[in-house]
Amino acid sequence: MRLDIVSIFPEYLAPLQLSLVGKAVRTGIVELGVHDLRQWTHDRHRTVDDTPYGGGAGMVMRPDPWGEALDALVPPGAPGDPLLLVMTPSGRRFDQALAAELAAEQHLLVACGRYEGIDARVVEHARTRLRVLEVSIGDYVLNGGEAAALVVTEAVVRLLPGVVGNPASLTEESHAADHDGLLEYPVYTKPPQWRDLDVPEVLFSGHHGRIAAWRREQAVERTRERRPDLLPARHEPLVVTRAVPE
Ligand SMILES: Nc1ccc2ncsc2c1
Protein backbone atom coordinates (compact mmCIF):
# COMPACT_ATOMS: atom_id res chain seq x y z
CA MET A 1 0.00 0.00 0.00
CA ARG A 2 1.06 3.54 -0.77
CA LEU A 3 -0.11 6.19 1.67
CA ASP A 4 0.26 9.92 1.06
CA ILE A 5 -0.76 12.30 3.83
CA VAL A 6 -1.02 16.06 3.28
CA SER A 7 -1.02 18.47 6.22
CA ILE A 8 0.18 21.94 7.24
CA PHE A 9 1.66 20.21 10.29
CA PRO A 10 3.60 17.27 8.79
CA GLU A 11 5.53 16.86 12.04
CA TYR A 12 2.22 15.90 13.68
CA LEU A 13 2.47 12.64 11.68
CA ALA A 14 5.93 11.79 13.06
CA PRO A 15 4.48 9.02 15.31
CA LEU A 16 3.88 7.01 12.12
CA GLN A 17 7.62 6.34 12.09
CA LEU A 18 7.27 4.45 15.37
CA SER A 19 6.12 0.96 16.34
CA LEU A 20 4.14 -1.24 13.97
CA VAL A 21 3.42 1.40 11.37
CA GLY A 22 7.06 2.50 11.36
CA LYS A 23 8.14 -1.12 10.94
CA ALA A 24 5.64 -1.61 8.08
CA VAL A 25 7.21 1.39 6.36
CA ARG A 26 10.76 0.20 6.97
CA THR A 27 9.96 -3.29 5.69
CA GLY A 28 8.25 -1.94 2.60
CA ILE A 29 4.74 -3.16 3.41
CA VAL A 30 3.69 0.49 3.33
CA GLU A 31 5.17 3.29 1.26
CA LEU A 32 4.50 6.44 3.27
CA GLY A 33 4.72 10.01 2.06
CA VAL A 34 3.96 12.90 4.43
CA HIS A 35 3.68 16.21 2.63
CA ASP A 36 3.54 19.82 3.81
CA LEU A 37 0.66 21.54 2.02
CA ARG A 38 2.64 24.77 2.09
CA GLN A 39 5.03 23.42 -0.53
CA TRP A 40 2.19 24.13 -2.98
CA THR A 41 1.88 27.80 -2.00
CA HIS A 42 3.65 30.54 -3.92
CA ASP A 43 3.37 33.68 -1.85
CA ARG A 44 5.90 34.98 0.63
CA HIS A 45 3.70 34.07 3.58
CA ARG A 46 2.93 30.58 2.22
CA THR A 47 -0.77 31.32 2.66
CA VAL A 48 -3.14 28.32 2.94
CA ASP A 49 -6.27 29.96 4.35
CA ASP A 50 -8.52 32.97 4.05
CA THR A 51 -11.76 34.41 5.45
CA PRO A 52 -14.98 32.54 4.64
CA TYR A 53 -17.26 33.85 1.88
CA GLY A 54 -20.62 34.65 3.47
CA GLY A 55 -18.93 35.66 6.70
CA GLY A 56 -18.64 33.69 9.90
CA ALA A 57 -15.91 33.00 12.40
CA GLY A 58 -12.60 31.39 11.61
CA MET A 59 -10.75 30.77 8.41
CA VAL A 60 -11.21 28.39 5.48
CA MET A 61 -8.43 26.51 3.69
CA ARG A 62 -7.97 27.88 0.17
CA PRO A 63 -8.58 25.45 -2.72
CA ASP A 64 -5.54 26.34 -4.82
CA PRO A 65 -2.79 24.72 -2.69
CA TRP A 66 -4.94 21.60 -2.29
CA GLY A 67 -5.61 21.39 -6.01
CA GLU A 68 -1.91 21.63 -6.78
CA ALA A 69 -1.06 19.11 -4.07
CA LEU A 70 -3.50 16.53 -5.45
CA ASP A 71 -2.32 17.18 -9.01
CA ALA A 72 1.28 16.60 -7.89
CA LEU A 73 0.52 13.44 -5.91
CA VAL A 74 -1.87 12.00 -8.52
CA PRO A 75 -0.98 13.57 -11.87
CA PRO A 76 -4.08 13.73 -14.11
CA GLY A 77 -4.12 10.65 -16.32
CA ALA A 78 -1.62 8.77 -14.11
CA PRO A 79 -2.22 5.01 -13.84
CA GLY A 80 -3.81 3.59 -10.68
CA ASP A 81 -7.02 4.32 -8.85
CA PRO A 82 -6.14 6.07 -5.57
CA LEU A 83 -8.79 6.81 -2.94
CA LEU A 84 -8.75 10.29 -1.45
CA LEU A 85 -9.73 10.34 2.23
CA VAL A 86 -10.69 13.76 3.52
CA MET A 87 -10.61 13.93 7.31
CA THR A 88 -13.67 15.90 8.43
CA PRO A 89 -16.19 15.84 11.30
CA SER A 90 -18.91 15.73 8.65
CA GLY A 91 -17.66 12.50 7.12
CA ARG A 92 -18.66 8.83 7.22
CA ARG A 93 -18.01 7.48 10.71
CA PHE A 94 -14.78 5.48 10.77
CA ASP A 95 -15.13 1.98 12.17
CA GLN A 96 -13.47 -1.42 11.90
CA ALA A 97 -15.50 -2.32 8.81
CA LEU A 98 -14.25 0.80 7.04
CA ALA A 99 -10.70 0.06 8.23
CA ALA A 100 -10.95 -3.34 6.55
CA GLU A 101 -12.28 -1.75 3.36
CA LEU A 102 -9.43 0.75 3.28
CA ALA A 103 -6.83 -1.96 3.96
CA ALA A 104 -7.72 -3.42 0.56
CA GLU A 105 -6.76 -0.21 -1.24
CA GLN A 106 -3.49 0.07 -3.17
CA HIS A 107 -3.10 3.84 -2.77
CA LEU A 108 -4.64 6.12 -0.16
CA LEU A 109 -4.32 9.90 -0.11
CA VAL A 110 -5.23 11.51 3.21
CA ALA A 111 -6.12 15.20 3.35
CA CYS A 112 -5.86 16.76 6.80
CA GLY A 113 -7.95 19.92 7.01
CA ARG A 114 -7.48 22.65 9.59
CA TYR A 115 -9.34 25.82 10.59
CA GLU A 116 -13.06 25.70 9.69
CA GLY A 117 -12.39 23.23 6.92
CA ILE A 118 -11.28 22.99 3.32
CA ASP A 119 -13.03 24.98 0.55
CA ALA A 120 -15.79 22.62 -0.65
CA ARG A 121 -14.64 22.94 -4.26
CA VAL A 122 -11.57 20.82 -3.48
CA VAL A 123 -13.71 17.72 -2.89
CA GLU A 124 -16.07 18.74 -5.70
CA HIS A 125 -13.21 18.94 -8.17
CA ALA A 126 -11.40 15.85 -6.83
CA ARG A 127 -14.57 13.81 -7.41
CA THR A 128 -14.29 14.53 -11.13
CA ARG A 129 -11.20 12.33 -11.31
CA LEU A 130 -10.72 10.45 -8.03
CA ARG A 131 -12.77 8.32 -5.70
CA VAL A 132 -13.27 10.48 -2.60
CA LEU A 133 -14.43 9.49 0.89
CA GLU A 134 -14.95 12.02 3.67
CA VAL A 135 -14.18 10.34 7.00
CA SER A 136 -14.91 11.27 10.62
CA ILE A 137 -13.38 9.53 13.62
CA GLY A 138 -16.13 10.72 15.95
CA ASP A 139 -18.39 13.40 17.31
CA TYR A 140 -16.16 15.79 19.24
CA VAL A 141 -14.19 18.90 18.48
CA LEU A 142 -10.62 18.64 17.24
CA ASN A 143 -8.40 21.37 15.83
CA GLY A 144 -7.75 19.54 12.60
CA GLY A 145 -7.55 16.24 10.77
CA GLU A 146 -4.05 15.14 11.74
CA ALA A 147 -5.09 13.16 14.84
CA ALA A 148 -7.76 11.50 12.72
CA ALA A 149 -5.17 10.64 10.08
CA LEU A 150 -3.06 8.93 12.77
CA VAL A 151 -6.05 6.92 13.98
CA VAL A 152 -7.13 5.84 10.51
CA THR A 153 -3.57 5.03 9.43
CA GLU A 154 -2.88 2.83 12.45
CA ALA A 155 -6.21 1.00 12.22
CA VAL A 156 -5.71 0.33 8.49
CA VAL A 157 -1.99 -0.50 8.38
CA ARG A 158 -2.22 -3.03 11.22
CA LEU A 159 -4.63 -5.06 9.07
CA LEU A 160 -2.12 -5.43 6.24
CA PRO A 161 -0.55 -8.88 5.90
CA GLY A 162 2.77 -9.13 7.73
CA VAL A 163 2.27 -6.09 9.97
CA VAL A 164 0.94 -7.73 13.14
CA GLY A 165 3.17 -10.59 14.33
CA ASN A 166 0.36 -12.93 15.28
CA PRO A 167 -2.61 -12.47 12.92
CA ALA A 168 -4.75 -14.48 15.36
CA SER A 169 -4.57 -11.50 17.71
CA LEU A 170 -6.54 -9.48 15.16
CA THR A 171 -9.56 -11.68 15.53
CA GLU A 172 -10.29 -11.45 19.26
CA GLU A 173 -10.02 -7.70 19.63
CA SER A 174 -12.85 -5.37 20.34
CA HIS A 175 -14.84 -4.70 17.20
CA ALA A 176 -13.08 -7.42 15.19
CA ALA A 177 -15.46 -8.91 12.67
CA ASP A 178 -14.54 -12.48 13.71
CA HIS A 179 -15.46 -11.57 17.28
CA ASP A 180 -19.01 -10.64 16.28
CA GLY A 181 -18.02 -7.02 16.84
CA LEU A 182 -18.17 -7.55 20.62
CA LEU A 183 -15.90 -5.79 23.08
CA GLU A 184 -12.81 -7.61 24.28
CA TYR A 185 -12.98 -9.87 27.32
CA PRO A 186 -10.82 -8.91 30.36
CA VAL A 187 -7.22 -10.09 30.20
CA TYR A 188 -4.81 -11.11 32.98
CA THR A 189 -1.14 -12.00 33.37
CA LYS A 190 1.42 -12.57 36.14
CA PRO A 191 1.53 -12.20 39.11
CA PRO A 192 -1.38 -14.54 40.03
CA GLN A 193 -2.18 -12.35 43.08
CA TRP A 194 -1.75 -8.59 43.00
CA ARG A 195 -2.82 -6.19 45.76
CA ASP A 196 -5.13 -8.89 47.14
CA LEU A 197 -6.77 -9.27 43.73
CA ASP A 198 -6.94 -12.68 42.09
CA VAL A 199 -7.09 -13.90 38.51
CA PRO A 200 -10.36 -15.73 37.63
CA GLU A 201 -9.81 -19.41 38.49
CA VAL A 202 -11.07 -20.67 35.12
CA LEU A 203 -7.98 -19.20 33.44
CA PHE A 204 -5.78 -21.63 35.38
CA SER A 205 -7.95 -24.63 34.49
CA GLY A 206 -6.15 -25.51 31.28
CA HIS A 207 -9.60 -26.40 29.94
CA HIS A 208 -9.68 -24.52 26.64
CA GLY A 209 -13.41 -25.02 26.18
CA ARG A 210 -14.24 -23.59 29.57
CA ILE A 211 -11.82 -20.71 29.06
CA ALA A 212 -13.29 -19.90 25.65
CA ALA A 213 -16.83 -20.05 27.05
CA TRP A 214 -15.89 -17.79 29.97
CA ARG A 215 -14.23 -15.29 27.64
CA ARG A 216 -17.25 -15.21 25.34
CA GLU A 217 -19.55 -14.71 28.32
CA GLN A 218 -17.39 -11.85 29.57
CA ALA A 219 -17.31 -10.23 26.11
CA VAL A 220 -21.08 -10.39 25.79
CA GLU A 221 -21.66 -9.06 29.33
CA ARG A 222 -19.21 -6.19 28.79
CA THR A 223 -20.82 -5.32 25.50
CA ARG A 224 -24.31 -5.42 27.02
CA GLU A 225 -23.19 -3.11 29.85
CA ARG A 226 -21.02 -0.65 27.93
CA ARG A 227 -22.01 -0.77 24.26
CA PRO A 228 -25.46 -2.33 23.78
CA ASP A 229 -25.47 -0.66 20.38
CA LEU A 230 -22.85 -3.18 19.25
CA LEU A 231 -24.96 -6.20 20.11
CA PRO A 232 -26.29 -7.88 16.98
CA ALA A 233 -29.97 -7.17 16.41
CA ARG A 234 -31.48 -10.50 17.35
CA HIS A 235 -35.04 -11.64 17.68
CA GLU A 236 -34.05 -13.93 20.49
CA PRO A 237 -31.75 -13.05 23.39
CA LEU A 238 -28.06 -13.49 22.56
CA VAL A 239 -27.16 -17.04 23.40
CA VAL A 240 -24.25 -17.14 25.83
CA THR A 241 -22.74 -20.57 26.29
CA ARG A 242 -22.35 -20.49 30.04
CA ALA A 243 -18.90 -21.48 31.25
CA VAL A 244 -18.86 -25.27 31.54
CA PRO A 245 -19.51 -26.11 35.24
CA GLU A 246 -16.48 -27.53 37.13
N1 LIG B 1 -13.50 17.76 15.12
C1 LIG B 1 -13.30 16.61 14.36
C2 LIG B 1 -13.96 15.45 14.72
C3 LIG B 1 -13.79 14.29 13.99
C4 LIG B 1 -12.92 14.29 12.89
N2 LIG B 1 -12.62 13.23 12.06
C5 LIG B 1 -11.79 13.52 11.09
S1 LIG B 1 -11.28 15.15 11.15
C6 LIG B 1 -12.26 15.46 12.53
C7 LIG B 1 -12.43 16.64 13.26
Image (cartoon, rainbow, N blue to C red):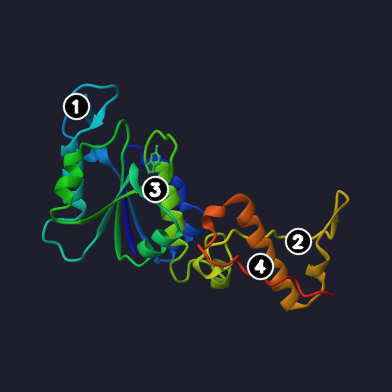
- Left or right: where 147 falls relative to 184: left
Q: Nearer the viewer, mark 1 or mark 3?
A: 3
For the residue pair 86 and 2, the one nearer the viewer reads as 86
Q: Name the N-terminal-most of marks 4 and 2.
A: 2
Q: Which residue is mark 2?
A: 189
For the residue pair 105 and 71, the one nearer the viewer reads as 105
- Secondary structure under badge 4? helix
Q: Residue at x 26, y 40 (%)?
A: 37
Amino acid type at image mark 3: Ala
For the residue pair 200 and 48, the one nearer the viewer reads as 200
- Secondary structure under badge 3? helix
Amino acid type at image mark 4: Arg
Amino acid type at image mark 2: Thr
Q: Mark on residue 149? A: 3
- Left or right: where 67 falls relative to 36: left
In three-dimensional space, the C-alpha distance between marks 1 and 3, rounded to whole angstroms, equals 28 Å
* Total count of labels: 4
Q: Mark on residue 44? A: 1
- Left or right: where 236 falls relative to 105: right
- State whether residue 161 appears in this view: yes
Where residue 25 sits: x, y (%)? 42, 60
Binning the other alpha carbons within 10 Å of mark 4 as few (below 14), some (14 to 19) or many (20 upward) gives many
Q: Is residue 48 above or below residue 95?
A: above
Quadrant hosting residue 214: bottom right
